[in-house]
Structure formats: structure tokens, C-alpha cells
Image (cartoon, rainbow, N blue to C red):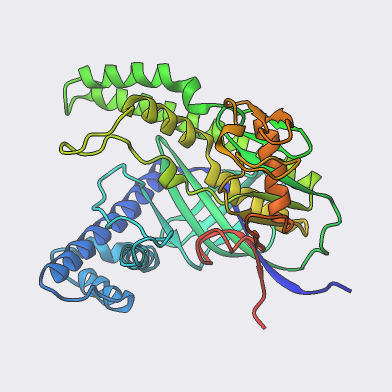
Amino acid sequence: MYDVAMIRRKAFRFRIEPTGEQRRALAQFAGARRWVWNHALAENKRRLEAGERTASYGEMCRWITAWRHDETTPWLADIHVHPLQQGVKDLHRAFKDYFRKAGDAAKKAFPRFKKKGDGDGFRYPMSVKAELSPDGWGRVWLPKVGWLRFRASRPIAGTIAQATVVREGEHWFVSIQTEQEVVAPAPSDLPAVGLDLGVARFATLSDGTPVEPVHAFARARRRVARAQRALARKQKGSKNRAKQRRRLGKLRRRERRVRQDFLHKASTTIARRFGTVVMEDLAVKQMSASAAGTVEAPGTNVKAKAGLNRAILDQGWHQFKVLLDYKLAERGGMLVLVNPSFTSQRCAACGHTEAGNRKSQAVFVCRSCGHTEHADLNAARNILAIGQGGSVTAGHAVQACGGIGREPPDEAGTHREAG
């Protein structure tokens, strides 16, 4: 009997409806978290410039205690300490990601100072409660803020582990992360499929099923460009400029929601149909790098490459991979990532590999056996064969969602229980 215990972490996101007083409190919490981040970052930069090491998480927490008792910043004492500590915890992780070895996929840029409106939000790691009422509304308790109402669009399953509050435009949202011990699903007996990601087609499955792209950015590009031109004409610091910035932000958020909705629906459909999905382990960051070059060595075809970069980033391949990973894991399935080398040049019928086999973006004609097929379908069949140990390189399985995302407890998903 397959009865391995697993801890499933899942996030439930709702738009909250705060009162005027609560809205001011949320803004104060977000501002205090931003202030602590900026001052801790400034002190760490000073240390680095002096040839010293950055402060540890524990040391930065002691800074928070000192600031809360400082006569110049008494207002920090009115803010719950946990969101402030979580802010410096994020900063500590940002430094760890920055100091990783060159070439490490997790290596990130140097932490930046935050300004008002730049990702306003904060996180509670504990002491959070939530209640649902029969009338479709719910309440969430945040220490030193109180009970906040939200529209309960779905029930909350599991024990609450933490809550993250963020502001997007004029609205506030809460993401309630829960933990629930579940029995690991039995391995899926659904068939395996190869999946080739692209731009003209978002994805092509090895059984011949195409997934057409949504092109969220391309659809919104004209309106965004018009809004950006209008913003450029507004006088800096004026109320009209602030209004135009909100209009532009609203367009950007709508674009993001359209893309996210499409990725959720596509990943759910595939996870329900197949038990194992094999796809390429694409290095999106390198694929979408600028071709501009430098003054001494300028790049070529810069405009065309910029258009390709926009199209690649518009697809949301990485987010799709993360969504597909955890949805397969919840159903006992598996995501297998393979080396993308030569998948579009190799003939799925005879195995002959040559760059000339790909006649165009859509047409594949093997120069050895004459096999003709849609190029994306041919690549998807190759990807499936590689994932099953066919040739070129073996794939590696990514199971139980933690294999792709950030380390817990900052991300929802399904995780095998220790011990």
C-alpha cells in the first residue's frame, strides 16, 4: 500500500476589503518593513565597502530591537516585530543568492533599495487566524491590524503557517499559506508525453496536440505604449502624473493576470491528461539576453533579437514549469527535464541529426530518410524519447514541487515529510 506521509503547502489568495483605518495601518506596516530593509541594506553595504562580511539574520534582528527602542524611531515600536524580522530575513537570503558562485542558476543581482510603491507588502510567519462565514465572506486576523474582511472564493484547507499581504494598485491582497499532512498519491498510471515549448505555438505535445499562445503582452502592447507616452508628457510630481501611473499599472496588472490565467488552465489540462511530462530544461535568462553588445563591440540584429526576447518573456515558460510541476505531483505524476540540445535538429523517425533538417520554423524534413513533419511535433517526440532514455542525454525527474521553486516555507506545494 502506498501510504507515504507528505506535507502539502498551499497558498490561498484573496482580495481584502480593509476599512480606512485598516488601510492606513497596512500602509504603515509596509512602510516600516521598507524602512528596515533600506537601513539594513545601507549598513551591509557600508560593511562590504570596508572589507567586512555582511551581517547574519540574527544580528540584523538585534538591529531591529535597537531601532524600536531608539528615540529617533519610536514609531517602529507600534509595528509588529514579525513583519520587520521577515523583511531582514528576505534581505539575508538576497545576499546569499548574490554571493553564490558564478553560473549558479540561483545567483541573483545585488539587493536594491526599495521605494514607496515598489512591492509594498509584508509577511507574518505565525499568529494568523482565518474564519469563513456562510454568506461567502471570510475574515483574517493580523496582529496589530485586526480582523480584515475578504471575499472567500474558495475554502481554506489545512493549518495556517503564514500570511503575506501585498498591495497591487489601489487594492490589498492576502496570501494565506497552509500546511496539511496528506497521504502521497499513488504513482500515476496515465501515459507519458513530450512537450516542446515555443513562441509561434506555446506548446506542442508529442501526441500532436497544439497549445496556442495567449500573447498577453502583445495584446496589451498598443495600450501600454499609449499610456507610457501619456505618462512621459505629464509634469513630474503632479497629480495627473500620479493618475497616469495608476492607469499604466492597471494595464500591466491586467496583462499579468491574463498570462497567469492561461498558464494555470494549460498546466491543469496537461496534468489531468498525463502522468509523466517530459520537457526541455530551458535557460530562459540566457535565451532572452540582449544582443546590443557594447560600444566597442556592438551587436548585430539587435532589433530583431529584442522582439524575440519580448516574445519569449511573454510566454511565461518558467512559471508554467513551476505550475505544471506541483500539479503533476499532487496527482502522483512526474515532471522530467531534459537537455534541449539538438531536439529540433534530430529526426524522430531515424535519429539523423543535422541543422539542415529544419527547413523553416514550422517544417522539418530529414535529409537522411525524408521524414516530414511539423517541426514542433518532431521536437516533442524527440523530447519524449530522451526522457525515456532514448538518446542524446537522459532527463532528470523533478518530483514533489520543491525541486524547482524556492526552499520552503516560502512557497506552496507538496513536500515529503522528513523521517
Residue 49 in which image quadrant: bottom left
Residue 237, image x, y percentages? 17, 29
Q: Residue furthest front?
A: 368
- Residue drawn at x 58%, y 63% as measured from the top left: 403
Residue 267 can be seen, yes or no: no
Task: Tell me the quarter of the image containing the C terminus.
Answer: bottom right
Task: Tell me the quarter of the image containing the N terminus.
Answer: bottom right
Classify 222 as above or below 401: above
Depth order, front residue of 256/356: 356
Depth order, front residue of 32/251: 251
Depth order, front residue of 181/31: 181
Q: Is residue 115 left or right of residue 18?
A: left
Residue 160, image x, y percentages? 60, 64
Residue 222 can be seen, yes or no: yes
Classify 169 as above or below 419: above
Residue 26, image x, y percentages? 38, 50
Classify 33 as above or below 150: below
Count of residue discs: 0
Residue 233 in which image quadrant: top left
Q: Is residue 245 left or right of residue 307?
A: left
Classify 401 as above or below 343: below
- Residue drawn at x 34%, y 16% as measured from the top left: 226
Residue 183 in which image quadrant: bottom right
